[in-house]
Image (cartoon, helix red, strand yellow):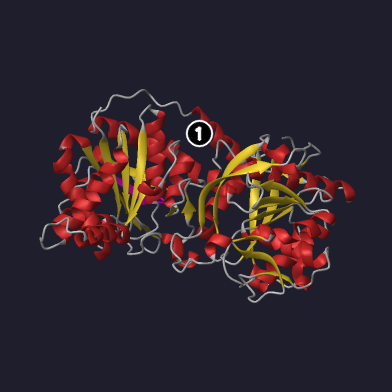
Amino acid sequence: MKSKFIFTTGGVVSSLGKGLATASIGALLENRGLDLTVLKLDPYINVDPGTMNPFQHGEVFVTDDGAETDLDLGHYERFISEKMAQRNNVTTGRIYDSVIQKERKGEYLGKTVQVIPHITDEIKAAILRVAGGHDLVMVEIGGTVGDIESLPFLEAIRQFRYDVGEENVLYIHLTLVPFIAAAGEIKTKPTQHSVQKLREIGIQPDILLCRTDQDLDKSLKAKIAMFCNLPQACVFTAKDVANIYEVPLEFHQEGIDEKIVEKLNIWTRKPDLLEWKNLVQKIKNPLHQTTIAVVGKYVDLTDSYKSLNEALKHGGYAHETQVNLRFLDSEGIESKDLQKALEGVHGILVPGGFGDRGIEGKIHAIQYARENAIPFFGICLGMQLACIEFARHVCDLPKANSREFEDPCTEPLIDLMEEQKKLINKGATMRLGAYPCSLEKGTLAQRIYQEKEISERHRHRFEFNNAYMESLGKKGMVFSGLSPDGQLVEIIEYPQHPFFIACQFHPEFKSRPMNPHPLFSNFIEASLLYQQRQAWSSQKTPATNDKDGSEKKTTKKATK
């Protein structure tokens, strides 16, 4: 079958959820038996988001092949089975870089290089590259219709319909239909103007997704359809939901997937959404609750930890548990305030990050977790800081530190990787992507994974200094995961603690709602057991949710 293409654009405002809408439609169409992939086109001039501040762009999602990509690729991987790669995220910077390199090589034969056709041709080539035999390619255009930055991408997808045939292309436009509380009315004018802007470019949307917090009745849909020049049957409500994993079910109930296969003239089987329904049922009716403290420095923008937040929730789904996240700014943490800040917490997680801001607050939190037997999980920088905390307070190395924060450093427990020392450029030069890790038999890590060798995704420049391995090992730290050559520390743990484990890699990138990452599901299990121990020690039982949502008391043990 010749590949079909769906292009998703957004209008009125940013952050409407184009990525989630694209991923949810992808989940439905894949469930119908279609082999599909997704491409994100980002209009910013950065070659990739790797050097961006998380407060500006949110999380950088890392793929197996080492690409630093937009966080929407994380949504794609969590909703469909296809693994993303470098080819699945293309930016303006990457497009222009490719065109300029070709011009320098003389590939344009003396022609004047212009946005049309050279830039638009390069964009279309990037779209065709990902097709590779797939039944369907879904392409999300970043930004908002009307932004000057996205114009070349919109022009390219306008041309694309005529390049591959009208019957092989579908345009979906996600727009906002706000409810004005003061007037008590739902307003369609922003949607009308957004579609008008899109039509000025030469693109007539085939399907409208109307993001709203209200139900849209037939008369409103008819009004939108009339002013936006498409059939009423192609105007769909994209109503706000409590949990993102409800979106595929809501879209299916609206009939969006049925309309897409009808307009693209594709034969598919009927979708079987039982797994999605069971997942949503678990989310809505948890048997337990637990509270996890995330101690970081990007907590004011939770999208900075998007995959991490979702992975923690996935760990909860494995135990029918609602995971309540408490974000603590590590800059504001002092050791004397920790007991109050962490009151009622059943697990502490220190995530990745860069730079020395907030480092001492994270170290205080790790020390508190270790000394008070609270389940602890460290990721990337979190593992490095767990080693520094252990060295300072257990191994009597008070000056232990990382060269990232202190250079020169008296006790460089964490040092720059050897291959990093000669690098000048910052972009795409870290240790990136999937690397193998060998697990020590009989360790917590090996029990969690039930494997001898694993593969996980990395994003870091600094690594544990093996010169200190013996010193920390004598005091009880176990280096349970190493690179196959034994040179790089990947996982550390402390067996004298009920659950104290940290890893150099980012396991959150591989967690899925229906297949939670084992490190996260075991961390949540440990937090439930800690909660039970706390309840037993105070002769109380933990509060949990009954199926009707009310609180009850239970002594039911957490299960794996």
Quarter of the figure with residue 269: top left
Query: Where residue 533 sits in the image (x, y, percent)?
Result: 84, 47
Badge 1: residue crowd in 10 Å (few <14, some 14–19, many ≥20):
some
Q: Residue at x 23, y 58 (%)?
A: 99
Is residue 109 rendered to the left or right of residue 383?
Answer: left
Magenta span dominant secondary structure: strand
Q: Name the secondary structure under disc 1.
A: helix
Q: Is residue 362 visible?
A: yes
Residue picked out by circle 1: 276
Q: Specify the quadrant that holds the N terminus.
A: top left
Residue 24 image offset from top left, x and y in percent: 41, 41
Amino acid type at mark 1: Trp
Q: Residue furthest bottom?
A: 408
Q: In the rendered image, which quarter is residue 548 located in?
A: top right
Viewer-proximal residue among 134 and 461: 461
Compared to residue 231, the image places residue 405 above or below, namely: below
Magenta stretch?
208-215
Q: What residue sits 65% from the left and 42% below the top?
A: 438
Q: Which quarter of the rendered picture does the C terminus lie within? A: top right
Instruction: Tell me where residue 230 sits by quadrant.
Output: top left
Residue 521: in sight, yes or no? no
Examine the structure image and report whether residue 500 is included in the region drawn in magenta: no
Give how far across and how far down residue 181 sits, in percent. Answer: 40, 61
Above or below 476: residue 288? above
Could you tell me how many numbered marks the image carries? Answer: 1
